[in-house]
Image: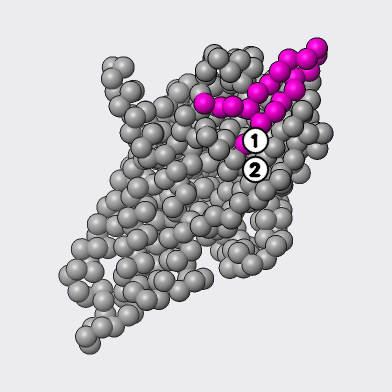
Amino acid sequence: MRQRPPIGIQLEPEHVELERTVADLCSTVLSSIAAHEETDPEAFDKIRKALAASGLLSYMVPSPYGGRRDRLDTRAIAIIREELAGTSGLADLIFVMQGLGSYALQIGGSEEMRALWLPRVASGEAIAAMALTEEFAGSDVAAIATTARADGDSYVLDGEKWFISNAGRADFYCVYATVDPEAGRSGITAFLVEAATEGCSVPRLMETLAPHPLGVVRLENCRVPASSVLGEPGGGFSVAMRTLDMFRTSVGAAAAGMARRALDEAIAFVKHRKQFGQPLSEFQLTQAAIAEMAVELEAARLLVYRAATVKDGGADRVTLEASMAKLYATEAAQRIIDRALQLHGGRGLLHGSITERLYRDVRALRIYEGTSEIQKLVIASQLFKN
């Protein structure tokens, strides 16, 4: 890929070096796997092992458990996702799920649980997953119907979780269930559920627009010890929101990475593709399209790295900044990739082409971790507080 222009936000030397390291991994290892990730049944494990060997997964846990810093480095996570997403949507997913799936454990788990699981998350030995969404509870988290009934020194969980990334591959799930269905969000509680627990199963895998390890996680009379509660009983909604607050910024980074790859591909294509006796790059409409794409991309990256910088500066919550970054970057990336495909003409529609893959990969980013519509509501609610 082309050298990225500066974003106007100061990164530390280790971030600059990290960008080079990830770019090198993408070009030398991941690109060859990504070329066949839709047809190779072993692609998931190959990518997981490559990410583990590179040490990148360690960025998803704090230093006492094998990580790089005392708290997660939001700028580093954004840099990694931006690089990975342009090469492989699957690599981006595997990377982020180690953090998204374990963050509730990091902030709410007992020391014993953290010591057991987080070093294995950092090394790639254990695969993490977050089980929040249900068939009838997506944007409306308070509508969660999965129940957790206290029984002695245990809880018994019953319900189904839908659209769960890493379903069937995860070693543990951070599951959200209600201990009091009448209490709304105040009854939601987070639990760590080991995948091997009796009563925890994956009855169905889901096929999506772009290849993605997604499925339904069923909990039937699934008994877990009371020590599996992450945070306080009834405090699960806060745990979930803190988790999303941490990782929403990085969704924008992944979108920027996909958009950057699309822009690179479009520039390379229009410079050599000739129509009416001249390269497409010499037509003013083409130049206008490329310019608009580049401006939108840099605006998206500025919002992403601003939010990441604020978080790394010590802010406990970056709800406004993260929602702005996710909303703008994902919507802009959709437009940029669509325009890149248009510039490629028929070639952009061919299955297996880079633009066609990016076109499918980017669509989910406007939905998961809060739809674009929800982000607008979050942004407005934050502004009305001031």
Q: Position of residue 274 (x, y in %)?
A: 29, 83
Q: Earlier in the sequence, mark 1 or mark 2?
A: 1
Gap in angstroms between the C-alphas marked 1 and 2: 7 Å
Magenta span of residues: 143-161
Give residue 163's quadrant in the image.
top right
Residues marked 1 and 2 touching at CB (< 8 Å):
yes
Q: Main secondary structure of the magenta part?
A: strand
Q: Position of residue 213 (x, y in %)?
A: 63, 51
Instruction: Kindly identify the amino acid type of the residue bearing the numbered disc 1.
Output: Glu
Q: Which mark is residue 160?
A: 1
Report whether 130 appears left or right of 318.
right
- Which residue position is annotated with label 2? 216
Say few, some or many: other residues with alpha carbon within 10 Å of mark 2 (under 14 / 14 to 19 / 20 or more). Answer: many
Report the quarter where the N terminus lies.
bottom left
Residue pictured at 75% horizontal, 19% vertical? 155
Residue 151, relative to residue 364: is it above or below?
A: above
